[in-house]
Image (cartoon, rainbow, N blue to C red):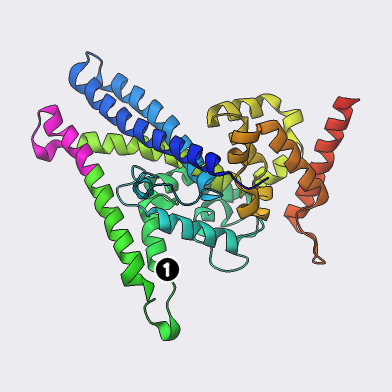
Amino acid sequence: FTKISPEQKMYMWNIYTLIFTLECLNIVMYWALLRFSPLSWGVCTAIYIFLMVVLCVQNVYILHDVIHGATFPPYEWQNYITHPLADFINLPWMDIIMEHNRHHNSTFDLLNHGEFGWDPASWLYVLQEWTFEWYGWLTVPLVPFWHFIGASDTGMLFAFLWWSRFPDAGPGGKCDKAFYTKWLPTRVKYVAWTSFLWGCVWLLGSWGMGLPLSEGWPFMFTVSCGTRGGFSAAWVFITNFNHSHWWNEFLATDPDRTWPRVHATMAFLLGGRHRWNEMLFHDVHRMCPGRIGAMSQRGRFHGWEKVHDACVEILARGLWISDDAETAMDKHQRKRSMLVKSRKASAKA
């Protein structure tokens, strides 16, 4: 968990730029398939959505990778390519940085949301934690749809929530001094950019198809469904799975030994074991996010297994030194560490 080097920062931002470029090219390819190929609308759309979901899942992971260790892009224009296709309106990069910092500062324990103040991500957990009775599971299937309509960090609803709460009011309830000089201009420029980008998608689906300007919405709606699907899928894993009681209880049983095929399959779907480490050790990441960084980011440069073993060792030593009563998360971590270390000792023997 050494400091990220300048070369590593540049590499990650180059990958980020590549992902955005591929997302744009995928939209153009979808238009070309509909316009010129003999394939049906269903086949063309299936190809587009599959590719876009894959790209957008990686988009969210690289977003999380760079925000912890390579926060500020090498070039100013890269502030505008981080996630503009996630929704028609969403937070600019500087707002994403601030809201993610607020999320970390208010929630240290994965299972105790908002322990140290308002957590902007708290509303993402409501559908899975409004009650711990059996009927609470009835609303869990609604979680992906909650993300899909814009409740996640890169969605429109989340942007409205954050803008209504940040920047914090000054003394006496007055408007923050930086609101008109920094935050409002940044937001206006970014929203103008996303409006232009989605306007281009509309034009591609109308004039680009030889249709009247008013007929661009079906194409734009389908394009948006593809991007929303990918971003929603990734955020469900990063936020709802990682912060759920069920998932952390499951991890405490050392599922890598008892469910190896499940782990291998999920790692494949998310883009590799280094991505899957983000799901396995999100508690370690949250202990010191600025220094440790993201697990998928570390695995990108040091290999997933080395990062995995280092996280197990950290869990074995304990994340916190405290005289407070042991929390549910502390118990899960201690049990899990003992099982994993026992398994590794047996394998060496």
Residue 222 image position (x, y, % from top left): 28, 34
Residue drawn at x 56%, y 49% is: 69
320 above or below 144?
Answer: below
Quarter of the image with the N terminus is top right
44 above or below 171?
Answer: above
Report whether 134 appears left or right of 217: right
141 above or below 327?
Answer: above
Question: Which portion, as a residue range, is magenta?
Answer: 198-215
Q: Residue furthest front?
A: 6
Instruction: Verify whether residue 10 appears in magenta.
Output: no
Q: Residue furthest right?
A: 349
118 above or below 1?
Answer: below
Instruction: Verify whether residue 208 appears in magenta.
Output: yes
Residue 330 image position (x, y, % from top left): 77, 54
**Secondary structure of the magenta portion, mostly?**
helix
Residue drawn at x 76%, y 48% is: 332
Report whether 73 appears left or right of 40: right
Report whether 58 appears left or right of 27: right
Q: Residue furthest left?
A: 212
Residue 275 image position (x, y, % from top left): 58, 35
Q: Which three-letter amino acid code belongs to the residue tagged 1? A: Arg
Circle 1 residue: 165
Q: Total label count? A: 1
